[in-house]
Amino acid sequence: MRDVVTFVFGLGLLGNAALFVPQAIAVWRKKSDAGVSLVTFGGFCILQVIGVVHGVYEHDNSLIVGLGASFLTCGTVTFLTIVYRLRRIRSQGGSQAA
């Protein structure tokens, strides 16, 4: 029974990772950070890294793989948000100086 629960838990973590993909696609397609909370996604990334480290210490491959995948997808949203936010700030700064 423990193996079944572990397997389902691992699938749940991979499902969690998949939930970030639509947001990453939306940010990438719009080329905009509008509506994305950097604090929220940055916080998710920190928690996922902590979970991966915990998984390493506990030798829990479900945590390592599942939260690693979540970090990859959530990190993509976070990275794209930072990129587009910096572009927006730079373009606003340049238009104010002119």
Image (cartoon, grey):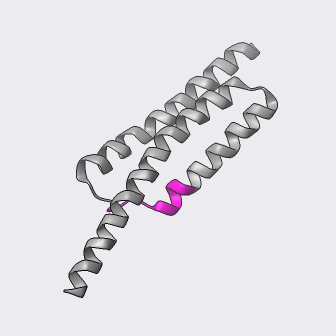
What residue do we see at 58% from left, 31% from top? Answer: 13
Rendered location of residue 50, percent (x, y): 70, 45
In this view, 42 is above or below 11: below
**Res 4 → quadrant:** top right
Residue farthest to the right, as pictured = 58
In this view, 22 is above or below 88: above
| Lateral position of residue 73 relative to residue 35, left or right | right
In this view, 26 is above or below 96: above
Number of numbered callouts drawn: 0
| Lateral position of residue 86 relative to residue 97, left or right | right
**Res 90 → quadrant:** bottom left
What residue do we see at 59% from left, 34% from top? Answer: 68
| Lateral position of residue 38 relative to residue 25, left or right | right
Magenta-drawn segment:
34-42
What residue do we see at 42% from left, 48% from top? Answer: 77
Residue 70 on the magenta segment = no
Q: Nearer the viewer, residue 40 or 33?
A: 33
Residue farthest to the bottom, as pictured = 97
Residue 39 on the magenta segment = yes
What residue do we see at 24% from left, 47% from top? Answer: 29
Rendered location of residue 95, percent (x, y): 21, 80
Rendered location of residue 19, percent (x, y): 44, 38
Q: Quadrant of the C terminus?
A: bottom left
In this view, 92 is above or below 62: below
Residue farthest to the left, as pictured = 98
| Lateral position of residue 37 relative to residue 97, left or right | right
Q: Quadrant of the N terminus?
A: top right
Rendered location of residue 52, percent (x, y): 68, 37
Q: Nearer the viewer, residue 2 or 60?
A: 60
